[in-house]
Amino acid sequence: MRAVTVTPGVPHSLKLTDEWPEPAAEEGAILVEALAVGICGTDQEIISGAYGEAPPGQERLVLGHESLGRVREDPTGTFRPGDLVAGIVRHPDPVPCANCAVGEWDMCRNGQYTEHGIKALPGFARDRWRVQPKFAVGLDPALAPVGMLLEPTSVVAKAWDHIERIGTRAEWQPQSVLVTGAGPIGLLAALLATQRGLSVHVLDRNTTGPKPDLVRSLGATYHTSTVGELDFQPDVVVECTGAPSVVLDTMCKVGPTGVVCLTGVSSGGRTIDFDAGALNRSLVLENTVVFGSVNANRRHWDLAAQALARADLSWLESLITRRVPVAEYADAYTATGDDIKVVLDFQQ
């Protein structure tokens, strides 16, 4: 069968093979036919050789962690043939740590977790894959065109879950949220914010292309200014750029008792002059919380599936700016400045 693979640590070793072995039975009882995989910055970094880990005893890693497929067979009876499913990316560590032991593997403390298409587990960019029932998430059949968005949606579902948990430390009635960055994570974070009835503001550098209209069609406000130039103090910030200056600006801008959730990952290597003392004073005196969030556990994947089912399907489809056949895989993994979400289509 076909599979898109890399040799981890070897830059630009991406290739499509037609002779990849069928998924091993120990991967899971449920056999799934791939429909599509979404492509994101993590895939680009693995292709560049920055990180990635093949399964034990193997040289190559199958890419793909934003999955979508149809069940072909499930002897456990959890799903029926034809059901739409996605595979959860992260699996708990084998020790397990305290968090993995209770299903909170997104909060793994020892780093021995595994991840499909990233770390020691084969990914979903292959014609067929297997999954254990507890790592398979069912999707509404109507989401067949966009179900590969479930993984990035699970990331922001976790972010909102933790934002709201932090908010319960006191009487908390948030009114406004600022999302910085209008990539897939930022747009999905804005979607979940609108579903919560908040006044949503999205800040991004793009003045053309689909992003401004996508934000406005949510009923949100689109900004291209700097964070500091905004004329309001948000109760919540979801930071999705990882740009150091933006990260610092959001900490300074959030309102009293506000919550700043960092989902973007900075590349490092840059220094910025800023008044750390003033920032510390503001964070302490205004009871501000700043925290980082990454990955998701089963609860968040289920919440994400519910959020997508409530969303406008045409809006979700607009996030997908390119659908590329598997035979043209190299084009799919070549980033362009106009893309929001690129999908590798296994059915073309």
Image (spheres, rainbow, N blue to C red):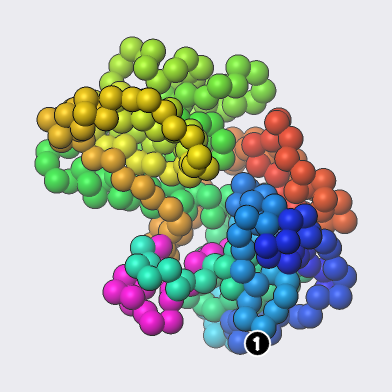
In this figure, which residue is indicated by the disc labeled 1?
A: 25
Inspect this view and state whether residue 100 appears.
Answer: yes
Q: What residue do we see at 87% from left, 70% from top?
A: 18
**Can I make out residue 73 in this image?**
no
Q: Is residue 85 above or below residue 333?
A: below
Rendered position, 319 above or below 155? above
* Residue 289 highlighted magenta (yes or no): no
- Please report the bounds of the magenta region as a residue range: 84-106
Q: Residue at x 76, y 80 (%)?
A: 22
- Is residue 38 toward the left or the right of residue 225 in the image? right
Q: Quadrant of residue 334?
A: top right
Residue type at mark 1: give it. Ala
Residue neighbourhood size for the residue with mark 1, other residues' Cα within 10 Å, grouped as few (<14), some (14–19), many (≥20): few
Instruction: Identify the image quadrant of the C terminus.
Output: bottom right
Q: Nearer the viewer, residue 280 or 233?
A: 280
Q: Which quadrant, please, contains the N terminus?
A: bottom right
Whether residue 91 is in magenta: the answer is yes
Residue at (54% x, 55% y) in the render: 151
Q: Quadrant of residue 163?
A: top left
Is residue 183 or residue 136 the one in the foreground? 183
| Rendered residue at 30%/50% (across/down) | 162
The percent coordinates of residue 78 (x first, y second) are 52, 78
Q: Position of residue 40 (x, y in %)?
A: 63, 48
Q: Nearer the viewer, residue 101 or 142?
A: 101
Residue 67 image position (x, y, % from top left): 63, 60
Task: Describe residue 3's horizontal placement relative to residue 327 as left or right.
Answer: left
Q: Secondary structure at mark 1?
A: helix
Q: Is residue 194 above or below residue 300?
A: above
Q: Quadrant of residue 86?
A: bottom right
